[in-house]
Amino acid sequence: MTTPEIAPLHEDLTFHGPLSEERATRLIHSLHPLDGAHVVDVGCGWAEFLLRTLESAPTATGSGVDLDATAIAHAQATAEARGLEERVSLEVADVARWQPRTPADAIIVNGASQVWGGDPLQHTANALTAAKNLLSPRGKLLLGEGFWEREPTAEQLAAMPIPRDQYGSLADLVDLAHAHGYRLLAVEQANLDEWDVFENGHALAWERWLRDHPDSEHAAEVRTKADRHRTYRLRGWRGMLGLAYLTLQAP
């Protein structure tokens, strides 16, 4: 059975993550100065954060890479509409096999540490290592990564597809970055409102499809996916799983 086409997330979300306009502006500023810099966004989705970063730094250039061809096509159209197409390269590619054409002065890995593959328990460590290998000396890494806001219960862990040891505390995350040679410049975390906006955007695409296709042969499949994700969210990670934004200085 072919999975039905669901509306892309950019129709309901500004950023592919729990991120407000105000926080996005602040995080972009944490990467400055970017005069003449090259910024790389791995797992960029529709690249809204990358494009805004380039808009904030008129002499900077950028590269964005993601496996989602629909997202990259939307990113390219957005770049052209904003007059940024000459300053950004957007590619459909596997990050694990990709190298930027220009050394990176700043790298964005926002909720995308899994793009390098491997054991989920090692995703964050792998991302820290891979990003350092792509960065110019003294470059900056903006890392959006999960952590436990508090210890999850056995019931919560049973309700979500995330093993307990995949994440630690926020302090553990910062310590891990320092163990890989970085220095912390700034840290923030997504609040519950930002998480709810993000999760609602995910859920809305499924519910809109179910409303518009009540008699489809795929309706049961789509409803099951929507219900499963709702359980993950409300009985599992809501208020438990945090997302930290770390601005890090590489050696």
Image (cartoon, rainbow, N blue to C red):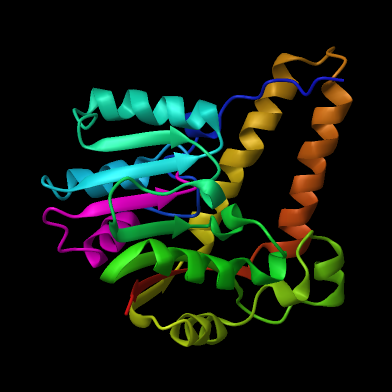
Q: Position of residue 128 (x, y in %)?
A: 49, 70
Image quarter of the C terminus: bottom left
Q: Could you tell me if residue 84 is visible in this image?
A: yes
Left or right of 166 in this view: 94: left
Magenta segment: does it hold 212?
A: no
Q: Is residue 172 above or below residue 56?
A: below
Q: Nearer the viewer, residue 160 or 58?
A: 58
Q: Could you tell me if residue 190 is visible in this image?
A: no
Q: Position of residue 154 (x, y in %)?
A: 86, 75
For image coordinates 19% across by 63% down, the residue present is 32
Magenta region? 22-44
Left or right of 148 in this view: 192: left
Left or right of 129 in this view: 123: right
Q: Position of residue 71 (x, y in %)?
A: 49, 31
For image coordinates 35% across by 74% down, the residue present is 248
- Seen from this angle, which residue lies furthest top? 215
For image coordinates 70% across by 15% down, the residue present is 212
Which picture quadrant has residue 223? top right
For image coordinates 32% across by 36% down, the residue present is 89
Q: Nearer the viewer, residue 2 or 239?
A: 2
Left or right of 234 in this view: 111: left
Q: Position of residue 179 (x, y in %)?
A: 49, 87
Magenta segment: does it hold 41?
A: yes
